[in-house]
Image: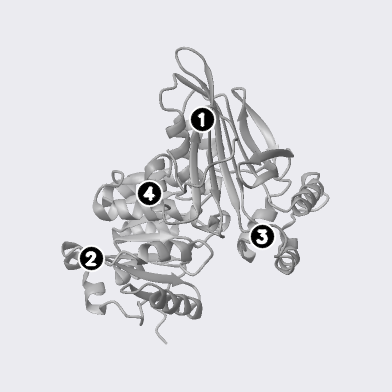
Amino acid sequence: MNDRPQPQNTPAPDATDAASGDDSRKASGNHRVVIVGGYGAFGAKVAERLARDPALEIVIAGRSRAKAQAYADKLARAVVGSRISFAVLDAQAATPDDIRVLAPTVLINASGPFQQQDYSLARACIAARCHYIDLADAREFVCGITQLDEAARGAGVCVISGASSVPGLSSAVVLHLSEGLRHLDEVHIGISPGNAFDPGLTTTRSIIGAAGKPFEARQDHAAVKRYGWQGLSGYTFPLIGRRWMCDVDVPDLELFPRHLPGIASVRFTAGLEVSAYHLGFWALSWPARFGIVRSLAPLARPLLWLKRRLHWLGSDAGGMFVRIEGRDPRSRLTRAWHLIARSNHGPYVPAIASVVLARRLIAGTGPAAGAMACFGPFTLAEFEAEVADLDIISKVDLRGRCSPYGPSRSQP
């Protein structure tokens, strides 16, 4: 069996075209997008959104041949007129030749968790001269991507890390909210998915493994130490109510002070919908903080098993918020933005940034060549346009309030 990552049936891209380059396809308006981890929780959503564009060929890629083929077949049946194929491709072992064989215009890496990954796939894309986007939310991975900037510029391609809820969407929202302000002082971002969302074992292990671990944040212009899944607080979302929240390490904590000099405080919190789960997880973080246990990651499998058995608890509704404080020439202001995702559409939210950026890169309207964290390369309006057909509400409140919303899906 040939282990080279050749696209395969449903239908297979032309092998000769792939091997010799895709200039003719690009000239005719056809482009190929390879999605590594394209059958995973978020990669599948990316593939679904892009497959609706008849000008795009979508390659579902990953380490599992069976899973890639099964999802490619499923997606091809679900999206009439789509061009879907699959390939075997390991994000950690792919070579430039492997990428050249597939001949993508854009490769999207949704194969997390990224805490255990390096930049080998991004380097392979640079060598193969194709654009690279990932859905990473690991702080060190996203913030360190600029080390590839010179190579990416030389190859004339974009390498974008963090095209996800954070820092991609969160930065778009903060830049929108801060328009007209003389000075931005504080940013607080929070996410709480619905209990119906199944993150999978690897994502669960990554989330649980961060409990009790220290990280640096910014408060009142000074660096402060916080701990994963501690700093217990509550937040009341419109429509879906109050949820417990805790501090979590994300790239935003480093990127916002870097890109917005003078900002005093940045905080990110996350919460589980079911209070018993959240408070239990918070309690478990203390032994990890004090070194009684090295990591809670070994608990991932039994805790995920329990969550799945109790899937009827909670709902399919999740939320995200961004609150900022700043000053205009006359006064101090608080502004807020809320996203409410229902009908189990929350898992689309981390996928949308990569979809928007892939479309822009293919259209030739993306960022200039180089390697960058995903801080502000698309607008909130572009995100809202992409989710207009989903049960997702996005609303800005310039008064910073948390009042219930009307029935519209997306409001300015």
Chosen colour scheme: one colour
Instruction: Give the amino acid type for the residue marked by disc 2 in the picture.
Output: Asn
Residue pointed to by mark 3: 205
Residue 56 falls in which quadrant of the image?
A: bottom left
Residue 388 position, x and y percent, is 41, 52
Residue pointed to by mark 4: 385
Q: Which mark is residue 257?
A: 1
Instruction: Give the amino acid type for the residue marked by disc 3 in the picture.
Output: Arg
Q: CA distance from mark 2 to mark 1?
A: 40 Å
Residue 96 position, x and y percent, is 34, 65
Density class for disc 3 (Cα within 10 Å; few <14, some 14-19, many ≥20) is many
- Identity of the residue drawn at 31% across and 64% down: 53
First along the sequence among labels 2 and 1: 2
Q: CA distance from mark 4 to mark 1?
A: 29 Å
Q: CA distance from mark 3 to mark 2?
A: 39 Å
Give the number of callouts. 4
SS of the residue at dot 4? helix
Density class for disc 1 (Cα within 10 Å; few <14, some 14-19, many ≥20) is some
The answer to whether residue 310 is left or right of residue 26 is right
Residue 208 falls in which quadrant of the image?
A: bottom right
- Identity of the residue drawn at 74% across and 39% down: 232
Residue pointed to by mark 2: 30
First along the sequence among labels 3 and 2: 2
Tag nearer the camera, 2 or 1:
2
Q: Quadrant of the C terminus?
A: top left
Tag nearer the camera, 4 or 1:
4
